[in-house]
Image (cartoon, rainbow, N blue to C red):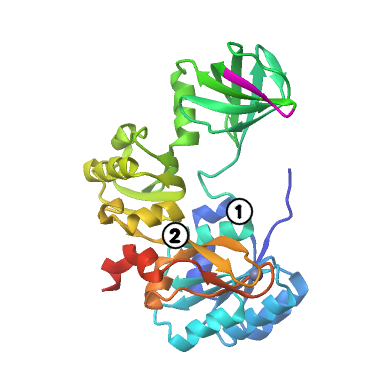
Amino acid sequence: MTRPVPKVLVSNNGELLRHFTAPPFKRLELQLLVAPTAAEARALFAKEEPILVVLDADAPDGFEIAKEIKQKSPATRVVLVAGSRLSGDQMRQVSACGCDELLIAPMTADELHDVVAIQLGEPRPGTEAFAITVEISGKRVDATVSNLSVDGVRLMVSEPVAEGQSATLTVSPQGESPVTIKGTCVWAQPREGRTVVGVAFDKPEPQAKAMLAKLTQWQVRKDGERTRVVLRGDFTEATRFDELLPQMVGRITFDMAQVTYMNSLGVRAWCEFLRQARIQGYEFHACSVPFILQASMVRDVIGRGTVTSFFAPFHCIGCDHQEERLLQSAAILASSLEPPVFKCPSCGGALEFDDLPERYFAFLEDEAD
Ligand SMILES: [Zn+2]
């Protein structure tokens, strides 16, 4: 499967250009169009029609060009990069120009990569898709998969299935060899011509067990000096982080984008894990809304670490459109916890932050002092 090489227009800013050549960007295979001047930025945009534009807000006409591009081509994603001494006037310009994201410099290559990958709709490391095929009593069936856990899975099968039949799942993550997991259909209910089936896994092989943990709980990958840990799914009384402890050495980046739910027992297990882990230093990237809601109530959820970026709920009053936007902590701190206003992608109205800033941003309070 090939895709056109995404063209990205970038201001001639040393920090940005250095990051765009850093390891995390290699896999995105972008074509960079570097614009040294405002005139060249306009000309390159008109000629090349890039799908993403990353503009230095401090460069001449930075806000103006962002606004022109969003007016001419609303589908083009525009990211503005500003310094941390953002004035109230500049913050208003950020909202008025209709840009899709604001980044505060200096930033790390990882931070820029998270924003670019999300804007381009590309998977970030650890969020790659996986394919699952299903066999019932040895026969391949058409099935959709939900509620995958280390213990079992729920299937919607396009034909009748009886309790007690065997089930075999073959999981093929992108770029890795497939793993087979065997189980038994423990319940089956007909529904609208199909069958909803609960499968309990037999005691999985170590390789299958590791794969299930990776797909449903966490994935650890060495990333140069750092270790990147992608957490997944629900944190509840059933979640055990013990098996993750031995790998928690050195500097860690936790990617929390796929944490879907945390109850109080899950919060307790997570805080206990952070206390026990012998980590030198750690950061949280792309934190999900459920994680931030807990972190803003219970300080120990981020322990000694810092939140680099996080998702926040946004809402358009005009058309009722809702979406989550990735915000950089530095951008919220630079604006004294004032959330940005974006342009609604559905109706062009104001896409506004949909929570109470003092409640949602409470996890930043220690840094705001
Ligand atoms: Zn709208």
212 or 43: nearer the viewer: 212
- Classify the position of the N terminus by image quarter: top right
- Give x and y (percent) for residue 30: 64, 59
Report if the CB atoms under discs 1 and 2 are less than 8 Å apart. no
Please identify the quarter of the rendering in which residue 25 is found: bottom right
Q: Can residue 284 be seen in this view?
A: no
Residue lying at the far right in this picture: please name it.
Answer: 47
Q: In this view, does 19 lie above or below 14?
A: above
Residue at which label 2 appears: 310
Mark 2 lies on a secondary structure that is strand
Magenta stretch, residue numbers: 187-192
Q: What residue type is labelled 2?
A: Phe
Residue at 58% x, 11% y: name it: 164
Secondary structure mainly formed by the magenta segment: strand
From the top left corner, tell me how far across and down residue 167 is, in percent.
60, 17
Q: What residue type is labelled 1?
A: Leu
* Cα–Cα span, label 1 and label 2: 22 Å
Ligand 1 is within 8 Å of the C-beta of the residue at disc 2: no
**Is 141 a magenta residue?**
no
Residue denoted by label 1 = 28
- Camera-near label (1 vs 2) is 2
Q: Which comes sooner in the sequence, label 1 or label 2?
A: 1
Q: How many marks?
A: 2
Q: In this view, does 279 lie to the left or right of 74?
A: left
> Which quadrant of the frame does ligand 1 lie within?
bottom right
* Image quadrant occupied by the C terminus: bottom left
Q: Is residue 263 visible?
A: yes
Residue 150 position (above or below residue 108) = above
